[in-house]
């Protein structure tokens, strides 16, 4: 609520546009590309404004971005971009949701923040008389210091479990998993860890003969990083895992790492370009002897990762490239590229594409003994390969009424 009060007190510094002759509320375009912003709810609650479906038609574009925070909630940024007669009148509002916020609480916080931002576009016109602005009475408890001591000292923990069961007369799949997560995040450093256990059982009956495979995996990941300059950070990774699918009894890794961020870290939601380099040692114990006649080995390695992301009014783009290599045998390596693009081509036309691909030269854990066909088909063991890829793409074209923001939920969700 404090940012709402400060926002209203600072309205005078934002008043720079002339009052329109017809006193119509500004048209709004809610540009919510990847964040969860409950668009249908906002259309209903912000019914005073015309919410258009194309950003070119809008007087005010609201670019919504979010990022998960240390407590499991979301940090939101609302970028209000003035257009047409409101060009040059822009502002930024930031707020966060908690991990225990219900959906209703989260969407109410978004609504209040958007409403507060839109007030600055009404304050210099007679439209302000339509706004209902209320503040709670100051309570005695409000005199307490805002920043009381945190008894948890920024530590956050979570426990989780899930299960999935599906099947037909001659086919079934059971999946169960559990995880423990925790960590401590401050402006200067971050410590996080997670451990997991997954088990999957698949079976199929063909000609009265049942084929069954059980695959389990478990492991842990620990990360520590500390910033030592505005765009530099250093830390390291400690990892360990077991995987029947990969023929690994247990693998443990330890690797110091360093990161350089081209853009300021605070601009993470809108743009980022980061490079992370790590070098370490991996100790491997295999379930079966590998195709290289190894049952246990310790290998030095290094990895470099580049991450780029842009979230702008025209759309969003992200790319990640990584290269992994064993230093004891430079011919054993893996290169991976992942790209995602959502682009507004023209009025009402959006194009989306996603793809990832890998060149794989480091399958050192392949078992020397070949698995039976049924185990392979049911996903019980990996196959040798030199490449892996996945891609999807599509476009969407919307035309018709620009200003129809009516939401009618009747019969929704029924097939």
Image: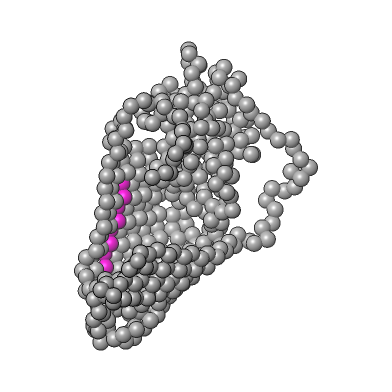
Above or below 322: residue 113: above
Which residue in the rendered view is the most extreme toward the top?
21
The percent coordinates of residue 117 (x first, y second) are 53, 32
The one nearer the camera, 328 or 370, is: 370
- Is 12 one of the magenta-colored residues? no
Question: Could you tell me which residue is drawn at 47 percent across and 65 percent down?
Answer: 163
The percent coordinates of residue 235 (x first, y second) are 46, 66
The percent coordinates of residue 314 (x first, y second) are 34, 37
Question: Could you tell me which residue is drawn at 52 percent across and 61 percent down?
Answer: 189
Quarter occupied by the N terminus: top right
Q: Is residue 249 left or right of residue 132?
A: left
Quarter occupied by the C terminus: top left
Question: Could you tell me which residue is drawn at 47 percent across and 36 percent down?
Answer: 409
Q: To which quarter of the image does residue 54 belong?
A: top left
Q: Which stretch did the figure color magenta?
A: 333-341
The percent coordinates of residue 388 (x first, y second) are 24, 64
| Residue 92 visible somewhere in the drawing | no
Question: Could you tell me which residue is drawn at 68 percent across and 33 percent down?
Answer: 135
Which residue in the rendered view is the most extreme toward the right?
140
Magenta stretch, main secondary structure, is strand
Q: To which quarter of the image does residue 355 belong?
A: bottom left
Above or below 361: residue 389: above
| Residue 205 visible somewhere in the drawing | yes
The one nearer the camera, 142 or 10, is: 142
Q: Is residue 140 left or right of residue 202?
A: right
Q: How many marks?
A: 0
């Amino acid at each position: 609520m404090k940012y709402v009060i400060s926002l209203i007190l600072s309205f005078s510094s934002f008043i720079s546009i002339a009052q329109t002759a017809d006193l119509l509320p500004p048209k709004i375009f809610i540009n919510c590309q990847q964040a969860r912003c409950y668009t249908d709810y906002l259309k209903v609650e912000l019914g005073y404004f015309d919410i258009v479906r194309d950003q070119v038609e809008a007087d005010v574009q609201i670019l919504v971005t979010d990022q998960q925070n240390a407590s499991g909630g979301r940090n939101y940024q609302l970028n209000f971009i003035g257009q047409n007669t409101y060009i040059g009148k822009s502002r930024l509002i930031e707020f966060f949701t908690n991990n225990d916020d219900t959906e209703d609480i989260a969407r109410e916080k978004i609504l209040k923040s958007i409403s507060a931002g839109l007030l600055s576009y009404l304050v210099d016109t007679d439209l302000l008389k339509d706004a209902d602005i209320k503040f709670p009475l100051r309570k005695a408890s409000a005199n307490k210091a805002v920043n009381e001591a945190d008894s948890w000292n920024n530590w956050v923990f979570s426990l989780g479990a899930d299960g999935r069961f599906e099947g037909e007369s001659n086919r079934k799949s059971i999946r169960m998993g559990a995880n423990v997560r925790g960590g401590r995040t401050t402006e200067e450093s971050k410590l996080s860890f997670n451990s997991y256990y997954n088990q999957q059982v698949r079976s199929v009956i063909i000609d009265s003969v049942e084929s069954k495979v059980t695959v389990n995996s478990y492991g842990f990941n620990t990360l520590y990083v500390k910033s030592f300059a505005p765009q530099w950070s250093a830390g390291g990774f400690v990892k360990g895992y077991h995987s029947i699918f990969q023929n690994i009894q247990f693998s443990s890794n330890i690797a110091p790492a360093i990161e350089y961020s081209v853009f300021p870290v605070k601009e993470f939601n809108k743009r980022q370009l980061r490079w992370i380099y790590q070098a370490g040692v991996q100790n491997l114990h295999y379930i079966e002897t590998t195709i290289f006649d190894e049952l246990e080995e310790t290998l030095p390695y290094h990895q470099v990762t580049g991450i780029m992301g842009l979230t702008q009014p025209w759309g969003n783009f992200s790319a990640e490239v990584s290269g992994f290599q064993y230093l004891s045998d430079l011919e054993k390596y893996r290169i991976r590229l992942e790209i995602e693009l959502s682009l507004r081509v023209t009025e009402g036309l959006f194009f989306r594409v996603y793809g990832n691909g890998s060149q794989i030269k480091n399958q050192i854990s392949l078992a020397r003994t070949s698995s039976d066909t049924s185990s392979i088909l049911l996903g019980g063991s990996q196959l040798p390969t030199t490449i892996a890829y996945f891609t999807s793409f599509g476009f969407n074209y919307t035309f018709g009424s620009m200003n129809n923001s009516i939401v009618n939920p009747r019969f929704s969700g029924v097939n």
